[in-house]
Image: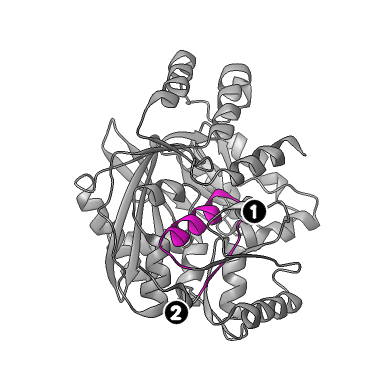
Amino acid sequence: MNDLSRMPPCYVLGIETQIGLSLIRELGEAGIPVIGIATDADAIGLRSRHLAHGEMLHKPRTEEGLAELRAMGKRHGRGYLLTVSEANTSWLIDNRDSLGNITPLLPSKQAFEIVLDKARTLEAAEAVGIDVPQSASPTDWAEVEALARDFRFPAVLKWSDPNAVAPRLRAHGIELVKAEYVYTAEEFLAVAERYRPVGEWPLVQEYCAGMGLGQFFFMHRGKAVRRFQHLRIAEWPPEGGFSSVCDAVPLAQFVDLQEQSIRLLQHIGWEGVAMVEYRYDPASGRAVLMEVNGRFWGSFPLAMYCGAGFGLLSYSLQGQERMPDLQPLRENLRCRMVATEVKRLKRILLEPGQIRDRTFVRRPLHEILRFAGDFLRPSVRYYVWNLKDIKPFIRDVRNMLGV
């Protein structure tokens, strides 16, 4: 049995969602003292029974916030820090030597900048032979007009780095739309006109049919020491976004694609945990790269339940240079976020006009039967609900109800 008095704590920043909560559960189950750091007093992670201590960070991404973290390190002792969001990762990368007793477990600044920039990520993928969607990044209005003439529509418009462009859009009173579908040159020009006051335009990317395929790796010294993959069974929004239901996929499938993903991460110089995301079309067998997430991802609970051990690897291997004992990987589980599924069903059944992808095929009866049937499947797990750790679920329901 682990001697907790000798194990340095793991600080987890960003415990408001299922991602940070799952990190707490995974590390706590392994006997590691977890210090959860929240920016919201109603964070679901603060209610987990696996938490050794809960802390509040009142001024994240500021000098005062760094001082708060240093004070936590003095209270709880030397330990390692995992974080969830890209914004906090960038902040900590820039201040990794300013945290006192706390050692953040982070990728290199150079590698993280590549995965934050979708255009640079696609360039790196092409360099190692990965199929990527036709893409273009207009820099002025003349290039916008040229694209309208020459690009093969339909297309999806995505910002290369949403976090970077958001403040500039807000300054002009323009909403950040992470993904927008255009089907003709005329529609593209109408959307592009919205951004003329900013003088910046989103990445124009070929529309790719299919479903989300996520491949997950822990890279250490250029090698993939752990792998996991899943398929998105349902997404929010329905036309494509993040998983509301996902299935583990046996590693015996998509083997060649896994090796391509690893070559991409090696090319970028990635160390630590990463998600390589594809759009996979079962009809054609084509898998097209969408992006690389250099952080713990939204469907991380499935990886936790399947015993992938990515949080434990970060703490033990990235932090202590010690390979942990990992359980055999389960490859037969499904995980779901019921609240998001309800929202998705409402959109499909009652608000079909709000589905932006006109090619999305609505199957109302199939969706209802699958939603209801999953409650009866013994292999289904839940993003927040866990019978062994109920209080985060209760807090989550109260948060949704505003009480």
Report x, y in % for residue 33. 51, 68
User: From the viewer's perspective, is 77 left or right of 69?
Assistant: left
Residue closest to the eye, 256 or 129: 256
Type of residue at label 1? Trp
Mark seen at residue 250: none
Name the residue beneath numbered marker 1: 141
Magenta-highlighted residues:
9-32
Q: Secondary structure at mark 1?
A: helix
Asked whether residue 70 is drawn in magenta, I would say no
Quadrant of the rendering where the C terminus is positioned: top right
Q: Earlier in the sequence, mark 1 or mark 2?
A: 2
Label 1 environment density (alpha carbons within 10 Å; few <14, some 14–19, many ≥20): some
Residue ranking furthest to the top: 365
Is there a contact, CB below 8 Å, between mark 1 and mark 2?
no
Residue closest to the eye, 371 or 56: 56
Report x, y in % for residue 197. 76, 54
Colour pattern: one colour
Who's the residue at 58% across and 31% down the image?
A: 356
Report x, y in % for residue 351. 63, 21
Q: Is residue 189 above or below residue 317?
A: above
Name the residue beneath numbered marker 2: 6
- Alpha carbons under labels 1 and 2: distance apart: 61 Å
Q: Is residue 308 above or below residue 149?
A: below
Q: Secondary structure at mark 2?
A: helix
Specify the quadrant of the image occupied by residue 98: bottom right
Asked whether residue 30 is drawn in magenta, I would say yes
Residue closest to the eye, 84 or 198: 84
Type of residue at label 2? Arg
User: From the viewer's perspective, is 119 left or right of 47?
Assistant: left
Say whether residue 355 is visible. no
